[in-house]
Structures are given as structure tokens and as C-alpha cells.
Image (cartoon, rainbow, N blue to C red):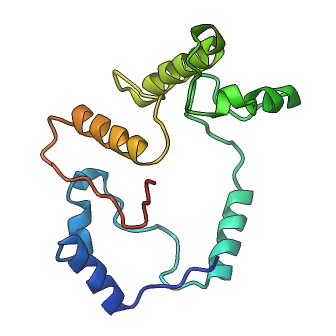
Amino acid sequence: MPFIPHTESDTQAMLRDMGVEDIEELFDEIPSELRCLGLKGIPKALTEFQLARLMRERSAKDQIKLNFMGAGAYEHHIPAAVWEIATRGEYYSAYTPYQAEASQGTLQVIYEYQTMMASLTGLDVSNASLYDGASALAEAILMAVRINRKSRSKRVLIPKTVHPF
């Protein structure tokens, strides 16, 4: 899908709807020393085609693929059987059956996932039992708010495009 830039009036309308004066105000939460103030070596005005070509040329020069994910999360061979097992209904649904013995595999997968996510994110807890739609959104927001209790910000941004039903 091609990128179609917003007009100045579109941008002003969006900022007004969000209750901010300018785009910089959206980034107030980010410490200034962590902000990127410009893209180095990329001309100001490029077409989509020119930018894609520039990025392809630059990525072709990369010799070493750095991976900082750790915990075995890197590009490696995944046997075809893994896809078959992972797509079984008892694994991909957020809903667990009521019979304890029937849900042991799902519960084990959820536990392993939560443990890995907590390790990767550095959080004390991780929740993988989110149900669909509105309850998942509410649970995710509540978890984020609880984890960030010491933060100055009390805002939670939810775009109108999120439809949790």
C-alpha cells in the first residue's frame, strides 16, 4: 500500500483531536538523550521507489546480521512438524477447556511463553491468558498501568481504529 502523506490541515486536525499543540508534544515521554533527531545519510525528499532502492542497496552491504534477542530466538531451521503441532486448536486458542487434564499442554505452553516474555522484557510478570477483544485490551492496559505506576504519565493512548469487539 503506497504512502500518501497527510496535508497540514490533516495533521492539525489529528493533533487537535489528541489534545496536543504540536507533534513534538507526543514525544515528551522520551528523554531527549534517547531521541533520534534525524535520519543520517538519507536525503530529505525521496520517492517511495527511490527510498526502497536506497534501503535495498544499503542492506546488501551488511556483512554481519546482528541479533540481540537471545534465549535461542534467532534465525534457525524450524522443522515442518512444528507448524503442524503449533496450529492444533488446543494451542492457538486463548480459551482453555474446563477439564484440567485436557488443558495441561495449553497451560504448559502458556507458562513457558509467560516465562520467556518476562525474561525478554525484563518485567516481573507477563500475562499470556488474554482473551479476545475488549477483555484483552482492558487486561493489557491494566497491566501496563500497574507496571508503570512510578511514571509521571497517566495517559493511555487508544486510537479510534482499535475495535476491541
Residue closer to the observer: 66 or 161: 161
Could you tell whether 90 is left or right of 134 in the image?
A: right
Count of numbered circles in the view: 0
Residue lying at the far right in this picture: please name it: 80
Query: Seen in the image, is 77 located left or right of residue 49?
Result: right
At which x and y percent is residue 35?
31, 57
- Along the line of sight, which residue is nearer the eye, 122 or 148? 148
Q: Position of residue 147 (x, y in %)?
A: 26, 32
> In the drawing, does residue 126 fall left or right of residue 12?
right
Give the residue furthest to the front: 98
The residue lying at 67 percent from left, 42 percent from top is 65
Which residue is found at the position 67% from the left and 73% from the top? Answer: 52
Residue at figure coordinates x 52%, y 17% from the top left: 111
| Image position, residue 145 (x, y; %) | 24, 39
Left or right: 164 in relation to 150:
right
Q: Is residue 122 above or below residue 1?
A: above
Which image quarter is the C terminus in?
bottom left
Q: Is residue 66 above or below residue 98?
A: below
Q: Which residue corresponds to the image point at 23% horizontal and 33% vertical from the top-left?
A: 146
The foreground one among 28 and 100 is 100
x then y, percent, for residue 32: 23, 55
Please identify the quadrant where the N terminus is shown: bottom right
Residue 73 figure quarter:
top right
Query: Image quarter for residue 26?
Result: bottom left
